[in-house]
Amino acid sequence: MSRPVPNPGILDIAPYTPGKTPVAEPGRKVFKLSANETPFGPSPKAIEAFKQVADHLEDYPEGTSRVLREAIGRTFGLDPNRIICGAGSDEILNLLAHAYLSHGDEAISTTHGFLVYPIATMAVGAKNVVAAEKDLTADVDTILKAVTPRTKLVWLANPNNPTGTYLPFDEVKRLRAGLPSHVLLVVDAAYCDYVSRNDYEMGIELVATTENTVVTHTFSKIHGLAALRIGWMFGPEHIIDAVNRIRGPFNVSTPAMYAAVAAIEDTAHQAMSKQFTETWRNWLAEEIGKLGLKVTPSVANFVLIHFPTEGKTSDAADAFLTRRGLVLRGLKNYGLPHSLRMTIGTEEANRLVVEGLRDFMAGR
């Protein structure tokens, strides 16, 4: 019996596997620390803005996300006409792949880059080329060596998920300068709001001064709007024009749009979250390090914890912590089978994880 057959390469794609969602049990408090969600939720102003549009859900959204593009423009000093919004930055990444990659092309990502990159690349028939990282950090020279005449796009998460590492802005500029002019550099800055390093820049300056660079961002992390699926991109006019031609006409819902406007304007909520994250990120790295476990230095809202390959393994630690209601992220699908990624949670959750890891390492 015949049946529809997917395009070549589609069934070679490993489906994206999200972080575990814990199942609540009677009498046990559960902490989900597997998806890099903010422990504070969205700004109360964003929640109120969301509620205010609930009486008009029968109306289609304004198709260009104008009010949100203008709010982003005010916040970052950008031309709203060079901004495009999407149903999460994931949608925008896929739109870029559809617009700039085709069968036989190549796109470069790094060893432990965001898994959406190879999915978006392979979905359009292009080849995903992996450039090795150095100390779990993207390496400019390795990326440049991976370029061939077929290379059309480079994906760069900065900071990177799931490692938490980043490239200084001078290195990103060196990467751009070393790439052929026809190669699109996509800087994914989903976690940029948590970075407090003087040598970091999310990529806006590079986009403003080149014709072949874009930067994407999301409202899912520090803004706490993950359930609404909303992200944005700043790029050259010709790239925005190309992506707009294939973007769905109503891809951003009205509630998401107005909640995002309120969220980006609530700078106090963002500052509070950033300061809390930085304080507890440092504390977790120090306390977990005292237990004999290595923690990769992170600038994001999570830490990457490394376990021995035998004995006190990451699998055993994951099972141990899960029994205590502490759900972290296993990383076999990211090529890190001996590591767990922990979202920085509430003070209670953070202390319980350290206590749990202490008992685990001591065999209690």
Image (cartoon, grey):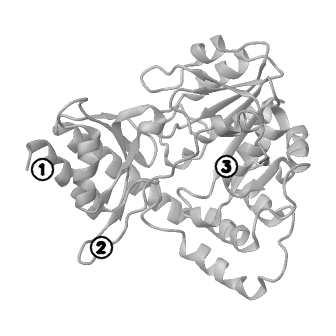
Query: What residue would you read off at disc 2?
Result: 25
In the rendered image, residue 202, in percent from the top left (x then y), is placed at 62, 39
Residue drawn at 28 percent across, 63 percent down:
325
Residue 90 - label: 3
Residue 349 appears in the picture as rendered = yes
Inspect the image, locate mark 2, and give the three-letter code of the amino acid beneath it: Glu
Answer with left or right where residue 252 lies relative to residue 27. Answer: right
Q: Nearer the viewer, mark 2 or mark 1?
A: 2
Look at the numbered discs 1 and 3 and tell me whether their residues touch, using CB distance below 8 Å: no
- Relative placement, left or right, of 236 versus 35 is right
**Which residue: 55% across, 34% down?**
113
Which residue position is annotated with label 1? 359
Q: Position of residue 341 (x, y in %)?
A: 38, 44
Position of 284 with respect to 301 (left or right) is: left
Disc 3 residue type (three-letter): Asp
The local secondary structure at tag 3 comes to: helix
Indicate the quadrant where residue 231 lies. Answer: bottom right
**Quarter of the view holding residue 96:** top right
Determine the residue positioned at 58% across, 45% down: 15
